[in-house]
Image (cartoon, grey):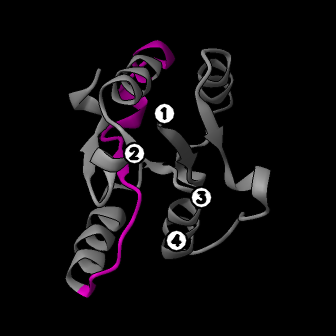
Amino acid sequence: MTLAYYFDEDAINTNLIRAARSRGLDVTTPIDVGMRHRQDEEHLAYAHQQGKVLFSSNVGDFCRLHGDWLRLGKQHSGMLLAHQWDRHSIGSMLRGLLRLAAQRSTTEMLNRLEYINDWI
């Protein structure tokens, strides 16, 4: 099954979302599903319920949540985090999203934390 992404509010970039969707990626945002202004844990839980990899530039909070959830035995559908969001072009971010989707399955992403810099 192809990876699907849930971009949290920190990762919303209209140009990147439009580019990702135009290349066939399944991308959902909090705006699409009425999840604006929710807590990070709620976004992670929603992404997991939908079987989507959470994409965020909120590295610190989601690294902590990743560790907390694993310690508590809670599962998530994977996280893709972006360090230094503003240093990457839309094209390089899109390449990272496409590469991850091409090389990792939904099963392989279960409870996994990745950094987009490793896929650019």
Q: Residue 45 carries which label?
A: 4
Between marks 3 and 1, how big is the CA–CA gap? 13 Å
**Residue 42 sits in quarter:** bottom right
Q: Which of marks 4 and 1 is in front?
A: 1
**Residue 85 lies in the magenta-colored region:** yes
Callout 4 crowding tier (Cα within 10 Å): few <14, some 14–19, many ≥20? some
Q: Earlier in the sequence, mark 4 or mark 1?
A: 1
Q: What element carries label 3?
A: helix
Between marks 2 and 1, how big is the CA–CA gap? 7 Å
Residue 39: % across, % down: 56, 75
Q: Do the residues labelled 4 and 3 touch (CB within 8 Å)?
A: no
Residue indicated by mark 1: 2
Name the residue: 36% across, 45% down. 80
Between marks 2 and 3, how big is the CA–CA gap? 11 Å
Residue 104: % across, % down: 31, 34
Callout 1 crowding tier (Cα within 10 Å): few <14, some 14–19, many ≥20? some
Residue indicated by mark 2: 106
Q: Give the range drawn in magenta.
A: 72-93
Q: Which of marks 4 and 3 is in front?
A: 3
- Kind of residue sitting beneath label 2: Thr
Residue indicated by mark 3: 50
Q: Which of marks 2 and 4 is in front?
A: 2
- Kind of residue sitting beneath label 1: Thr
- Please tell me whether residue 100 is drawn above or below residue 110 in the rendered image: above
